[in-house]
Amino acid sequence: MGFPKDFIWGTATAAYQIEGAAFEDGRGLSVWDRFSNESGRTFENHNANVACDSYHRMNEDIHALKEIGVNAYRFSLSWPRILPEGIGKVNEKGMEYYDRLIDSLLENNIRPFVTLFHWDYPLELFYKGGFMNRDCSKWFGEYTQKVVDRFSDRVSDWFTQNEPPCYLYNGYLNGSMAPGIRLPFPDYVRVWHNNMVCHGEAVKVIRSEAKLKPSVSYVACGDFAVPATETPEDIEAARCRNFERTEADKYYCDYAECFDPVVLGKYPKNYEPYLPDYWQDDMKTVVQPLDYLSMNIYAGVKYRKSSNGAMYEPVPNKIGKEESTMPMAVVPECLYWASRMVHERYGMPVMISENGISDNSWVFTDGKVHDPLRADFLDRYLSAYKRAADEGIPVKGYFYWSMLDNFEWCMGFSKRFGLVHVDFESGKRTIKDSAYHYRDIIKSNGEILK
């Protein structure tokens, strides 16, 4: 069967990780501007004040997308570039930047997929409580309204939020990422709920105000549990690990935590004691119609039926396992099992909105970047994803992370995920060998995959 004819082949970025121009043209500050400019917060005190300088190098980046041959580009909008204080007065120069980006993509037959929020929360709104303030959903709704008013005559594909387990757990529970807060677990659950209401408000605005017929999705993340063997017992063990953990008073990143609220209107059982009394009324806002579910998946962990009576147990990694420089284990079958299990649970089409690998490839003396590990990674993971398509699972598309080597949050510029190499001192771009391999896969619509 293979991938459908209208399969989306793309690559992705995020505003804070690539744009730079942090203090130019009226942009406001985000929590990440403050966090990454505080000593000791990131690898070797790196920050994204300049990053990949995509704000000034848009034409080069569009050319790279065209050269790679993708038919879609997923990028995020910088909320504080559009609304410097998070709400209120619009920064016209910020709007004009995204006007130019969207128009240029369309001129090159590249479909824009817009993420409303990818971690760079406006600092002024954080000072008002951020996701701890119940008004955060009103703020997000106002921001969404201004974005939809401006861009929905050309943009039809929307993601509301990117990876809430990352920016909430790391930002508000363990404090390792911006804004760097450590809340007690009960307070963290309130933050999680407020964030879900933000998502729902955004979908309501998009559905009611968009000029082009919109397609809307929600992006979850995390390592996916895959069965150690394809026996019914191990498949059920992996499914339980992904969707039915019940540890009390403990955060855990799984797909039920993200998708159950927005699709089924419920939370993990260990969250319920700490939810506000009005949470069930709020679910009328949280549960909005979505067109498909999106997943950012890089790795998987193998699970099997437990020998001691528990629902599941992890299988130890083999010695010398394949892994990236993050490090993340290379487990290609995670794309198959994630697509299958998420579709089985929620009955919706699925999208891989991020997937990629970091390595240490550099520019060789011949002026090229030879990165065979990334090319092999693409073959392995996309072949597993193709298995899902072959079995009739409705797969929408695939976005490789990332188009560019970029600022990898707390790890600074030490991890390179890009299809395009970036010299972070000069800004020079060099398209990697793997990008041309990806182009060949795209041209064949995946038929060259084994």
Image (cartoon, rainbow, N blue to C red):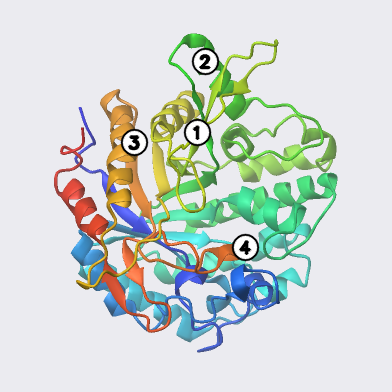
Q: Which residue is labeled 4 in the image?
A: 140
Q: Earlier in the sequence, mark 3 or mark 4?
A: 4
Question: Which quarter of the picture shows residue 57?
Answer: bottom left
Q: Amino acid at mark 2?
A: Asp
In x, y percent, where is residue 432?
26, 63
Gap between marks 2 and 4 measured at Cα: 41 Å
The residue furthest bottom is: 25
Rounded to the nearest angstrom, the CA distance separating label 4 from label 1 is 46 Å
Q: Is residue 150 above or below residue 446?
A: below
Residue 210 falls in image quadrant: bottom left
Q: Is residue 441 in sight in this rendering? A: yes
Mark 1 crowd level (few <14, some 14–19, many ≥20, 10 Å Cα): few
**How many angstroms separate mark 3 from mark 4 (CA)?**
29 Å
Q: Nearer the viewer, residue 65 or 435?
A: 435
Tell me which numbered mark, 2 or 3, is placed earlier along the sequence.
Answer: 2
Front of the two marks 2 and 4 = 2
Q: Are marks 2 and 1 in contact (CB under 8 Å)?
A: no
The residue that label 3 is drawn on is: 395
Please give the name of the residue rendered at 48% of the width and 30% of the height, measured from the top-left corner: 342
Q: What is the secondary structure assignment of the residue under circle 1?
A: loop
Indicate the position of residue 35 as horizontal and vertical percent values. Answer: 68, 72
Residue corresponding to mark 1: 319
